[in-house]
Amino acid sequence: MRSDWTDLPPEVLGAIKAHTGPIRRVEPALAGNHADIAATVHGAGGRMFVKAARKVAPNKDGAEVRSLRWEAAINPHVSEYAPCLHWTVEAGGWLALGFEHVQARHSDYTPGSADLDALAKVIDGLQSHPLPDVLERKRVERRWEFLADVSPLAGNTLLHADLNPANVLLGDASAVYVVDWTFAGRGAPFLEMALLLPWLLKAGHTFAEAERWVSRFPAWTSADPAAVDLFARVFADKWQANIVTNTADWALEHAAAAQRWAMYRRGRH
Ligand SMILES: Nc1ncnc2c1ncn2[C@@H]1O[C@H](COP(=O)(O)OP(=O)(O)O)[C@@H](O)[C@H]1O
Ligand SMILES: [Mg+2]
């Protein structure tokens, strides 16, 4: 859930202003919903993109703060894609990160969109990117291990793991930025495509079209179909569990797409 910029206590606001100078205007980001605050801040020296989260207690990080800490830790290791993290402040029970602001739009994943080519390049690049040491202990498949033996989903490939269209930003002169590295970790290489699949479905691809599109990646075609089936099943089950508490429209749609994909995979055998 987003908070409002005015919820920031004076201590953290002061620490932010030490970097931005006097703040003239703040525009909350429309997309996304993880960080408590995500906003473009117009300061004396120009624009910055600020993400901030509140601790659950003075010395206790909550899930949002932990996510931002991961994002800060990985940022210098993926500088080819991620807008640069310029500063971090921790004050008044908040953690705030100040990123380079990029002038870019969300990508469009509808069938036939040219943005899908930009996405494919990002995925190709990530798949061959060295795994940053900081992600050594961050195993993406952990999210589903309460549901099944997920060892077939383990691996050493760097995964962004949330390449939704609002996290892949396209700027001028074919500039591509990937934001929101909260879920990044390591795992089996096909997981990047598997996690993307529901977004392709939501953008209007049929199952067959979506699977055909991801078949351009060697990681997908060489994946054990049983591992993909396993993923589709645990992913759908986790989403069913999620929507008990998260009833936002996007979550219900995502859960439904996951469920349909799991059924589609089951029906193929
Ligand atoms: N560095 C940036 N410059 C400009 N806009 C950004 C930047 N980072 C993120 N955004 C915009 O803000 C939105 C939310 O940011 P994101 O990092 O995805 O946070 P969340 O965790 O809330 O999804 C993105 O979808 C994008 O539109
Ligand atoms: Mg996002």
Image: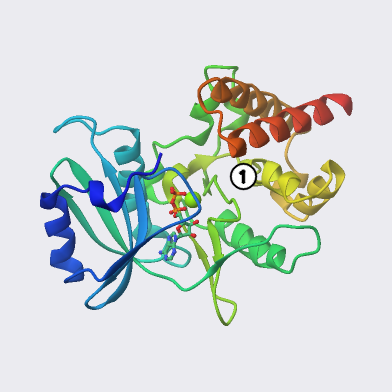
Q: Quadrant of residue 67?
A: top left
The residue identified by callout 1 is: 189
- Foreground of the two, 75 or 77: 75
Looking at the image, is 259 positioned above or below residue 43? above
Image point (34%, 33%), residue name: 63
Horizontal arrangement in the rendering, residue 137 relative to residue 103 (left or right): left
Image point (16%, 40%), residue name: 93
- Near mark 1 (Cα within 10 A), the count class, few <14, some 14-19 or many ≥20, is many
Image quarter where the N terminus lies is top left
**Rendered image coloring scheme:** rainbow
Horizontal arrangement in the rendering, residue 255 relative to residue 28 (left or right): right
Looking at the image, is 150 positioned above or below residue 204? above
- Foreground of the two, 211 or 247: 247
Q: Is label 1's Cβ within 8 Å of ligand 2?
A: no
Horizontal arrangement in the rendering, residue 214 relative to residue 77 (left or right): right
Q: Quadrant of residue 126?
A: bottom right
Image point (42%, 37%), residue name: 138
Image quarter where the C terminus lies is top right
Across and down, in percent, residue 91 comes to 13, 47
Looking at the image, is 12 positioned above or below residue 190? below
Tally the numbered discs. 1
Across and down, in percent, residue 226 comes to 75, 27
- Foreground of the two, 95 or 253: 253
Across and down, in percent, residue 25 comes to 30, 68
Across and down, in percent, residue 188 comes to 60, 39
Kindly state the secondary structure of the residue where label 1 is placed.
loop
- Foreground of the two, 114 or 14: 14
Horizontal arrangement in the rendering, residue 104 relative to residue 96 (left or right): right
The kind of residue tagged 1 is: Pro
